[in-house]
Every structure is written in C-alpha cells, then in structure tokens.
Image (spheres, rainbow, N blue to C red):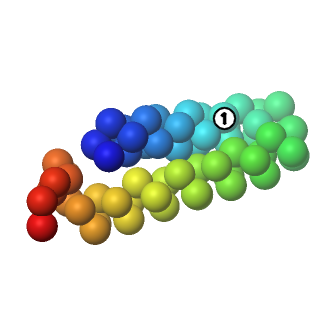
Amino acid sequence: MNLLMVIFALVAIFAVVNFFQAIKEKNILALVFSVATAAIFGWFVVMTILNQGYPPQLHH
C-alpha cells in the first residue's frame, strides 16, 4: 500500500499542475477532469495517511 499511495500522490500532484495549465489554455474540459482527478486521488492519499499513518502499519 505504501508504493501505491506514493503513486496516487504523484497522480494528484500532476493533476494540480495540469489544472493550472488548463487555466492558462482556457480548456474547460481539461479543467474539470484535472479537478476531479486531484480531488479523488488526493482524498484517497489523505484518508490512507489518516487511517494507516505514514509509514503505514502493516499489522494491527
């Protein structure tokens, strides 16, 4: 889960970068998808950190 969380965090970061690129290009569809991607993947990362801690606990 640790590596998957890092990959999802990178996806969320790239979505935020793409959000600003979409604003610059005035591309509404890219703006909507980048916001949705950043929100979903960012929420997953935040809730995983809150639930399991960082580094994640393997055994409860």
Q: Which residue in the rendered view is the most extreme toward the front?
A: 59
Q: Quadrant of residue 30?
A: top right
* Residue shown at 23% from the left, 62% from the top: 52
Q: Residue 31: percent from the left, percent from the top?
A: 77, 46
Q: Secondary structure at mark 1?
A: helix
Residue 22, relative to residue 39: is it above or below? above
**In the foreground, 53 or 24:** 53
Residue 19 in sight: yes
Residue at x 52%, y 43% (from the top left corner) = 12
- The structure residue drawn at horizontal position 28% and vertical position 43%, both measured from the top left corner, is 2
Between 59 and 41, the residue placed more toward the observer is 59
**Crowding at mark 1 (Cα within 10 Å: few <14, some 14-19, many 20+):** some
Q: In the picture provided, is 58 more to the left or to the right than 7?
A: left
Q: Which residue is mark 1?
A: 18
Q: Amino acid at mark 1?
A: Asn
Tell me where residue 21 sits by quadrant. top right
Q: Is residue 13 visible?
A: no
- Residue 53, horizontal then vertical, whole percent: 20, 59
